[in-house]
Image (cartoon, rainbow, N blue to C red):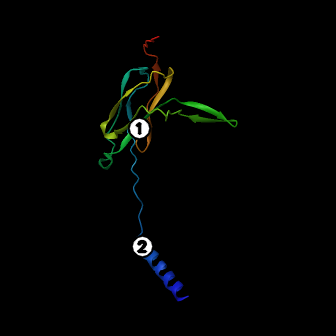
Amino acid sequence: MMLFTTLLSLFVTSTLCAPTLGPQELIVIDPEITSPKSGDIWKAGTTQLVTWKTDSIPPGSANTTGLLLLGHPSTIHQDGKDYPSENLDIKHPLASGFYLTDGNVTVVVPNWIRPRTNYMVVLFGDSGNTSPLFTITHGSQTHTT
């Protein structure tokens, strides 16, 4: 019993002497996408430049890498309710591993992409930023037989 009392006393003392942690600052990197712009038209198979502002990225986040996904907004009807969806193509990122402080990344628009007028790119660092809606059309493709 003496051993239990001693161990309990040590545990209580160690928890009371532990330093308390104050609130931790949450740094959110939220750069505004500047290109593509609303109304832009990309052709499948072409190379495009996606750009964003870097002035709000804190110096301590200089090595934060990004992920760029393509998506399009829609509404999913399930269980009698409507749910918004961005339909992000997480299986085929447009780009990944680039530094957010670069302010841009070059991407190739996939040839297999379906044409539509409401595409968006979403830039992830520690937060997701969505571009304005833009259009992707079919490029001029040659077929070999």
Q: What residue type is labelled 2?
A: Ala
Q: Picture coordinates of residue 79 (x, y %)?
A: 69, 37
* Element marked by disc 1: strand
Question: Does 64 appear above or below 123?
Answer: below
Q: Residue furthest front?
A: 145
Look at the image and tell me in which quarter the N terminus lies.
Answer: bottom right
Say which of marks 2 and 1 sits in front: 1
Q: Which of marks 2 and 1 is nearer the N terminus?
A: 2
Q: How far apart are marks 2 and 1 (CA)?
A: 39 Å
Asked which quadrant contains residue 40, the reply is top left
Q: Give coordinates of residue 91: x percent, y percent.
A: 49, 34
Q: Which residue is drawn at 51% across and 81% down?
A: 8
The 10 Å Cα crowd at callout 2, few under 14, some 14 to 19, many 20 or more, is few
- Does 57 appear above or below 71? below
Q: Three-letter amino acid code at disc 1?
A: Leu
| Residue at mark 1 | 67
At x 46% / y 75%, what residue is drawn?
A: 15
Instruction: Residue 35 in the image: state x and y as whole percent.
Output: 37, 28
Q: Which residue is drawn at 45% across and 29% down?
A: 132
Q: Nearer the viewer, residue 93 or 115?
A: 93
Number of marks: 2
Residue 29 disc label: none
Which residue in the protein does label 2 denote? 18
Location of residue 95 by image quarter: top left
- Residue nearest the observer in this picture, 46 or 101: 46
For disc 1, the neighbor class at 10 Å (few under 14, some 14 to 19, many from 20) is some
